Image: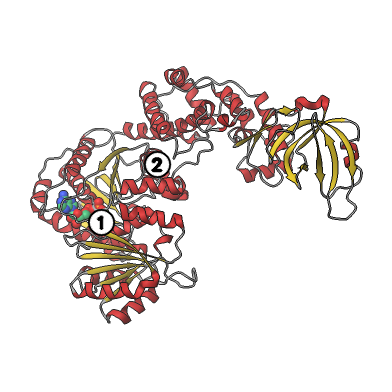
């Protein structure tokens, strides 16, 4: 089945095929991200209005929506322009007024003829002690009562799309809804008492109470699960395809790891040893590795990567490690080269900055296999870079490396094992959503001997005191980072520019003491400034967030972050992770512009309370939402219409297990349930995944 199943055609046809939708309205629907009937089907009401008829408004507490049968009384047209037109009506017990503004012609006389019975529905309010209903939502003849649902679903709206339009179109859709074979595990359905797909949709679109709107209602839970299952199936298919791809078994001999471990001034932590072993297992196996190494800043991911790289070199192959920035790539080179030399391993760097002759020589050496390990920026994956026998690609600190890119790397056709490392601890729910196609190793233990970082909040009004403290810290031989949000004053007028801060600190602390790095600097200058700071020549490094990831200067024990309230928690945590790497007690000062909002303070307080990156990311998620935590656009994180990643983590975990099991039992998706799962993938527009299904 490589084309969309016919049974789904109506859901993927034009919106204009639905009741009450013409070309104009169809266009307006696009603002709601509704392009086809399927999209409308998965756009659920977020509220419900109780329109059950009552006999009187007598006992209601205004303001509230009421539906009541009335006898129409006297009309009082507006005598003065701008004043309302009033119609007195009487229900079983009391009278009240219908109020209209901007009335034209005799429209109201036709709608509400005096002496007749009508059903009116709308919001009752008190005005000068009298009940009134301004512009009723509905006025119906008594015989038309059944056209008004007792519970009216409320949908998200946009200009040119009214509730009535959506209601009518969605009823049309529901009337013609097909039944689909069940793709959810029968045991799960029975245990959770979930309704079938079509009846779940029917009830989600026709809520009878607030409980039915709740994300926990059975209908909605099932529909959310469908989305998550489709997504996890895609990831599981990608994973299965990766694993099917024959890898080259690379078996560690210890010949190179041994000397390197002997050279290290420390022992690997338990978590590092565990991760190293998990990776060695993958490398030795004949399927392709696709593994994520998650570890907080400073948890020692680099050593794990190095051990993995040495394994493939021991087996006669080559490895590559890609860092997101030039600075980090160079730092890896500097940190790893001495270790590599100790084992006679040739390690080189390749970045966009290599001059052509230099570059050609390196490419040549790579192709011959004379370079064993290559570190660099994304330049290492350029088209003309050929390896002699590449077996392992390590991707460092890349939380922006989404599923799509990983699939691309796989599509290059190399049987390369892949290890992605992330320093942004992400909550389990997001890890599942973003990296569900991968196996995961976690470094949940920090190397010993770290002293906790003291974190304090300081108003920018006290900048002078901060600078005084800095002066005495420098006198004691300490070094500090000073992070500014943006480089150009003009970008956002009240943000502190790094260049201005640099000048001010230089004036206060002395020439030659203060360095500056920012993203707009020419690369060589940036390197030189970094090098001076690493060597301890400069004591204070004024920087933009280019230092965010990975930079390691153990003697730096002070981190000042200006306008901390502008940063995300995860980012602040990353920045703070730059200090506390040596044995001296470290300090992190979060400078904020007062007044700080209450949520602003609560956020920053979390950083004072904990240095646990996982806890911080959970809090960040709770306060901001999934898209923001990872940066939705590049995250590779899917947008779900119904599922809520923050509140339905358990469902996601369930979906992952279920998806992997389904594929394990039925790799070609050819059983009845497997076929139903294919339909689900089409329905959820995961068509790409279909191509990943095992063939032959
Ligand atoms: P990250 O996980 O942030 O990439 P790094 O690999 O840069 O962390 O390690 C941070 C620091 O910890 C480095 O200076 C490294 O030499 C040191 N380190 C790594 N593993 C250990 C260990 N087992 N014991 C002591 N120090 C370690
Ligand atoms: Mg690192």
Who is closer to the viewer here, 304 or 568? 568
Q: Quadrant of residue 25?
A: top right
Q: Position of residue 658 (x, y in %)?
A: 39, 26
For disc 2, the neighbor class at 10 Å (few under 14, some 14 to 19, many from 20) is many
| Residue at the image position 54 percent from the left and 29 percent from the top | 3
User: Is 596 placed left or right of 509 in the picture?
Assistant: right
| Residue at the image position 22 percent from the left and 48 percent from the top | 305
Q: Is residue 334 above or below residue 63?
A: below
Residues at discs 2 and 1 in contact (Cβ within 8 Å): no
Q: Helix, strand, or loop for circle 2?
A: helix
User: Is 9 placed left or right of 591 in the picture?
Assistant: right
User: Is residue 376 in sight in this rendering?
Assistant: yes
| Residue that numbered label 1 is attached to | 364
User: Is 265 placed left or right of 62 in the picture?
Assistant: left
Position of the C terminus by quadrant = top left
| Residue at the image position 67 percent from the left and 24 percent from the top | 175
Q: Position of residue 587 (x, y in %)?
A: 26, 63
Who is closer to the viewer here, 113 or 388? 113
Q: Which mark is residue 430?
A: 2
Q: Position of residue 258 (x, y in %)?
A: 9, 46
Q: Is residue 98 above or below residue 371?
A: above
**What is the spatial separation of the Cα atoms under label 2 and label 1, in whole angstroms?**
41 Å
Who is closer to the viewer here, 447 or 368? 447
Q: Is residue 587 above or below residue 267?
A: below
Q: Helix, strand, or loop for circle 1?
A: helix
Q: Is residue 214 above or below residue 537?
A: above
Q: Position of residue 436 (x, y in %)?
A: 37, 37
């Amino acid at each position: 089945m490589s084309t969309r199943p016919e049974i789904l055609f109506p859901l993927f046809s034009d919106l204009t095929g639905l009741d009450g939708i013409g070309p104009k309205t169809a266009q307006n629907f696009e603002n709601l991200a509704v392009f086809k009937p399927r999209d409308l089907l998965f756009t659920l009401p977020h509220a419900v209005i109780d329109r059950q008829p009552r006999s009187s408004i007598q006992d209601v507490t205004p303001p509230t929506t009421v539906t009541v049968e009335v006898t129409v009384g006297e009309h009082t047209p507006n005598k003065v322009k701008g004043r309302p037109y009033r119609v007195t009506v009487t229900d079983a017990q009391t009278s009240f007024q219908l109020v209209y503004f901007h009335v034209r012609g005799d429209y109201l006389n036709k709608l509400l003829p005096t002496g007749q019975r009508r059903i009116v529905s709308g919001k009752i309010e008190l005005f000068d002690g009298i009940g009134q209903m301004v512009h009723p939502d509905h006025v119906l003849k008594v015989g038309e009562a059944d056209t008004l649902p007792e519970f009216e679903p409320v949908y998200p709206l946009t200009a040119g799309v009214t509730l009535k339009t959506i209601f009518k179109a969605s009823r049309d859709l529901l009337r013609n809804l097909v039944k689909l074979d069940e793709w959810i595990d029968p045991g799960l359905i029975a245990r959770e008492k979930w309704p079938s797909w079509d009846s779940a949709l029917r009830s989600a679109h026709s809520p009878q109470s607030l409980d039915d709107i709740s994300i926990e209602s059975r209908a909605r839970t099932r529909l959310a699960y469908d989305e998550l299952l489709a997504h996890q199936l895609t990831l599981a298919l990608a994973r299965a395809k990766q694993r099917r791809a024959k890898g080259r078994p690379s078996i560690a001999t210890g010949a190179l790891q041994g000397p390197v471990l002997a050279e290290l001034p420390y022992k690997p932590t338990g978590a590092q040893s565990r991760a190293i072993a998990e990776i060695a297992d993958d490398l030795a196996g004949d399927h392709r590795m696709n593994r994520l190494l998650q570890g907080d800043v400073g948890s020692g991911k680099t050593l794990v990567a190095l051990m993995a790289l040495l394994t493939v070199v021991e087996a006669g192959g080559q490895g590559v490690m890609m860092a997101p920035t030039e600075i980090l790539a160079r730092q890896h080179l500097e940190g790893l080269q001495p270790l590599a030399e100790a084992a006679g391993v040739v390690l080189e760097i390749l970045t966009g900055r290599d001059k052509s002759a230099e570059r050609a020589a390196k490419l040549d050496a790579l192709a011959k296999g004379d370079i064993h390990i290559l570190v660099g920026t994304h330049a290492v994956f350029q088209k003309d870079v050929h390896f002699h026998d590449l077996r392992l690609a390590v991707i460092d600190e890349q939380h922006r490396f989404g599923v799509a890119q990983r699939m691309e790397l796989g599509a290059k056709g190399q049987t390369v094992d892949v290890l992605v490392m992330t320093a942004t601890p992400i909550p389990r729910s997001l890890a599942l959503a973003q990296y569900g196609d991968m196996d995961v190793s976690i470094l949940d233990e920090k190397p010993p001997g770290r002293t906790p970082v003291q974190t304090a909040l300081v108003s920018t009004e006290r900048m002078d005191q901060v600078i005084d403290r800095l002066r005495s810290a420098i006198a004691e031989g300490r070094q500090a980072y000073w992070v500014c949000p943006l480089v150009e004053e003009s970008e956002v007028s009240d943000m502190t520019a790094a260049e201005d801060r640099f000048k001010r600190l230089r004036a206060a602390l002395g020439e030659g003491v203060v360095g500056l790095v920012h993203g707009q600097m020419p690369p060589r200058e940036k390197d030189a400034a970094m090098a001076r700071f690493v060597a301890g020549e400069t004591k204070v490094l004024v920087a933009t967030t280019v230092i965010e990831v990975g930079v390691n200067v153990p003697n730096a024990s002070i981190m000042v972050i200006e306008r901390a309230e502008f940063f995300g928690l995860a980012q602040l945590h990353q920045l703070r992770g730059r200090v506390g790497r040596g044995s001296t007690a470290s300090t992190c000062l979060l400078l904020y512009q007062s007044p700080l909002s209450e949520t602003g303070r609560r956020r920053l307080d979390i950083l004072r309370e904990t240095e646990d990156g996982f806890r911080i990311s959970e809090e960040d998620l709770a306060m901001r939402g999934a898209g923001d935590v990872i940066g939705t656009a590049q995250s590779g994180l899917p947008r779900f219409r119904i599922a809520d990643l923050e509140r339905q983590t358990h469902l996601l975990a369930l979906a992952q297990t279920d998806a992997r099991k389904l594929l394990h039992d039925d790799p070609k998706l050819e059983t009845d349930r497997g076929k139903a799962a294919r339909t689900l993938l089409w329905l959820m527009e995961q068509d790409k995944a279909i191509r990943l299904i095992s063939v032959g």
